[in-house]
Image: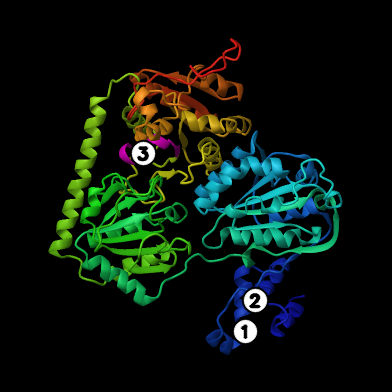
């Protein structure tokens, strides 16, 4: 047998990897097989011919149904979880899962939750997740969270069942003729499978396009009969032959120019956008900031993708507009410029500021502002190359040293300001949001994953939670947030995050309004014993709506009658709601009760259970003193607003 295998190798009928594999089957150790392969290749081959791995061969499958082909594909591609809801069109797929225990179907009570759960899994692991939806009903319910994945370029493959091909055009149950085009504005690629034998090919393409720059959801519809049809023969291409590198590098001249601009500036600023959610660059950016004496800020609604304790961190883009009066060089790294709520009355930058922009999203580069230096390139590769270039330059100058001192003083003063505000409200009832954040900062593990959906309090994590620059990025806390503005993401995303990172402590910080958009996800947490801590910031309002209503300075502001804001009358019992879904919890109304409640949450999580803490917090901003709510009574026969 050894002679036959060697002859095949010498005749180049099998490659080096296959030669070693076959010898392994014959009982030869891997080390000995590799040595023999090197010997047989000869001196010339060893000296002049690089060794590259042979491509993996596709796996042939015979007699499988369309549903079984999906299941086999997912196992080959190492996809352990499918998030979704069972439906009549997908029975052929679900039937294939029964004997394939490597696939865990995760049932959700609402498609909004299934999509957000998959999104959280992918954000936190970097792996592409899979969602199964039921026809037009499921796709429509999930569309909101598809927007979240699309806006933040999160790779998710969505499979949707639909009516049988031989029943198309009859307007049958849940038939939707253009179903595959429903989310076309919020998907990288949409497709309707037309032949069961092409399912592995379509799934490969869906994964590839979800992952390839700039990334985002793919959407595939598969008809009921195609899930159930047996395919005589087809094949699955291995994952190793479908990987696209996102490390798109700029040219050397561009890298040199970026360094030139930063070093020649009087007050440079580094601006981190939502591509930093998917690509970790914080330690590299920190070094660039230190070498150039630059400040670091976040885009709007961006999670804490940079350590908040770093002496060059200045907050979000609009936390202190006065910084722009000084900024003369602004480098947007993976950022939209700018995702504000309203168009600014004046230009954000001063007229002579130099604008630099790096992004893999071709539709964003230079879109809203003229740019002096821009490239469609990987933010990770670009920042690494700029850092390497800067290390060859003279950066120990008096001007740069002065800026380092200025930013350190600014960061210290900023932190002192927030600390002072928190101390003044320490014993306040209802509980001050700052006090709650301080208690969370003490309780949450230093390496925890924190999923936040706080809307009107989204500035508080970057103000009060320590994402410590003294810890390596791989060990410090991570924060996840969506820039889409679509509510109901947080709870399910936290559950998906924990499923993907079982050894991490995971918390969800959510407003009461956001919580009620996605509370059905608690049931999945209970069923699958997903130990997450859920903290509700409960001010009894859609506070963001009141902020914007008051900003108009119209009749709502004048009368204190803020329509569509109040979430009391009746008061929602979130603990009872959680209990109905199988999750324990408690209400906190006094500030000194926060810490013990969080300890009980941690104990439940350590025991493998989710836990909910509903904390009654203050109302803030204009109109906070109003207790008016829109009301009428149908029962009394006077259906008019009071």
Q: Is residue 357 above or below residue 148?
A: below
Crowding at label 1, few (<14), some or many (≥20) Cα neighbours within 10 Å? some
- Helix or strand or loop: what does disc 2 sit on? helix
Who comes first in sequence, dot 3 or dot 2? 2
Quadrant into which the N terminus falls: bottom right
Q: Position of residue 107 (x, y in %)?
A: 67, 37
Identity of the residue drawn at 36% across and 73% down: 254
Q: Position of residue 147 (x, y in %)?
A: 55, 47
Q: Which region shows up in magenta?
A: 452-464
Mark 2 and mark 1: span between their CA atoms?
9 Å
Q: Main secondary structure of the magenta part?
A: helix
- Helix or strand or loop: what does disc 1 sit on? helix
**What mark, if any, has residue 16 been given in the picture?**
2
Q: Is residue 460 magenta?
A: yes
- Residue linked to disc 1: 41
Residue nearest the viewer, comparing 349 with 509: 349
- Helix or strand or loop: what does disc 3 sit on? helix
Q: Is residue 277 magenta?
A: no
Q: Is residue 299 above or below residue 444?
A: below
- Residue linked to disc 3: 461
Q: Quadrant of residue 355?
A: bottom left
Residue nearest the viewer, comparing 634 with 364: 634
For discs 3 and 2, the disc positioned in front in the rendered view: 3
Crowding at label 2, few (<14), some or many (≥20) Cα neighbours within 10 Å? many
């Amino acid at each position: 047998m050894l002679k036959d295998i060697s002859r095949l190798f010498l005749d180049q009928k099998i490659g080096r990897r296959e030669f070693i594999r076959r010898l392994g089957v014959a009982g030869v150790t891997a080390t000995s097989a590799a040595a023999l392969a090197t010997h047989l290749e000869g001196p010339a081959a060893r000296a002049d011919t690089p060794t590259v791995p042979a491509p993996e061969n596709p796996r042939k499958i015979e007699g499988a149904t369309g549903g079984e082909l999906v299941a086999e594909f997912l196992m080959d591609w190492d996809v352990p979880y499918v998030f979704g809801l069972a439906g009549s069109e997908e029975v052929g797929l679900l039937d294939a899962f029964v004997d394939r225990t490597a696939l865990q179907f995760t049932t959700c009570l609402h498609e909004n939750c299934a999509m957000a759960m998959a999104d959280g899994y992918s954000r936190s692991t970097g792996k592409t997740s899979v969602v199964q939806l039921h026809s037009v009903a499921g796709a429509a319910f999930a569309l909101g969270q598809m927007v979240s994945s699309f806006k933040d370029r999160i790779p998710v493959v969505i499979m949707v069942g639909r009516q049988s091909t031989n029943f198309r055009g009859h307007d049958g149950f849940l038939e939707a003729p253009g179903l595959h085009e429903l989310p076309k504005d919020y998907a990288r690629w949409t497709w309707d499978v037309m032949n069961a034998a092409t399912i592995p090919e379509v799934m490969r393409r869906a994964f590839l396009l979800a992952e390839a720059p700039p990334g985002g959801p793919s959407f595939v519809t598969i008809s009921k009969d195609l899930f159930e049809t047996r395919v005589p023969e087809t094949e699955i291409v291995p994952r190793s032959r479908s990987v696209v590198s996102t490390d798109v590098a700029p040219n050397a001249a561009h890298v040199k120019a970026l360094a030139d601009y930063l070093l020649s500036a009087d007050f440079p600023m580094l601006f981190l956008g939502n591509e930093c959610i998917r690509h970790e660059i914080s330690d590299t950016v920190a070094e660039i900031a230190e070498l150039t004496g630059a400040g670091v800020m976040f885009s709007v609604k961006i999670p804490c993708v940079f350590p908040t304790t770093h002496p060059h961190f200045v907050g979000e883009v609009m936390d202190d507009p006065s910084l722009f009066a000084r900024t003369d060089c602004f480098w947007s790294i993976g950022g939209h410029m700018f995702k504000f709520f309203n168009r600014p009355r004046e230009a954000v930058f001063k007229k002579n500021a130099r604008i630099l922009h790096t992004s893999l999203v071709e539709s964003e580069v230079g879109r809203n502002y003229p740019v002096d230096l821009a490239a469609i390139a990987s933010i990770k590769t670009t920042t690494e190359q700029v850092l390497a270039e800067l290390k060859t330059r003279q950066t120990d100058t008096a001007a740069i040293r002065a800026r380092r001192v200025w930013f350190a003083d600014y960061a210290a003063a900023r932190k002192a300001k927030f600390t002072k505000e928190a101390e003044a409200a320490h014993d306040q009832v209802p509980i001050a949001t700052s006090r709650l954040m301080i208690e969370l900062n003490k309780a949450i593990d230093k390496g925890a994953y924190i999923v936040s959906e706080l809307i009107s309090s989204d500035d508080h994590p970057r103000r009060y939670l320590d994402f410590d620059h003294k810890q390596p990025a791989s060990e410090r806390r991570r924060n996840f947030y969506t820039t889409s503005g679509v509510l109901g993401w947080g709870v399910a995303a936290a559950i998906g995050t924990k499923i993907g990172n079982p050894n991490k402590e995971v918390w969800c910080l959510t407003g009461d309004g956001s919580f009620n958009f996605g509370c059905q996800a608690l049931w999945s947490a209970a069923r699958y014993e997903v130990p997450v801590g859920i903290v509700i910031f409960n001010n009894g309002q859609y506070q963001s709506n009141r902020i914007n209503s008051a900003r108009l300075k119209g009749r709502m502001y004048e009368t204190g009658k803020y329509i569509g804001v109040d979430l009391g009358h009746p008061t929602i019992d979130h603990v009872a709601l959680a209990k109905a879904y199988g999750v324990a919890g408690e209400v906190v109304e006094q500030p000194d009760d926060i810490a013990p409640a969080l300890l009980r949450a941690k104990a439940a999580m350590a025991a493998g259970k989710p836990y909910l803490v509903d904390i009654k917090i203050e109302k803030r901003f204009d109109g906070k003193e109003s207790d008016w709510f829109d009301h009428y009574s149908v029962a009394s026969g006077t259906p008019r607003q009071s």
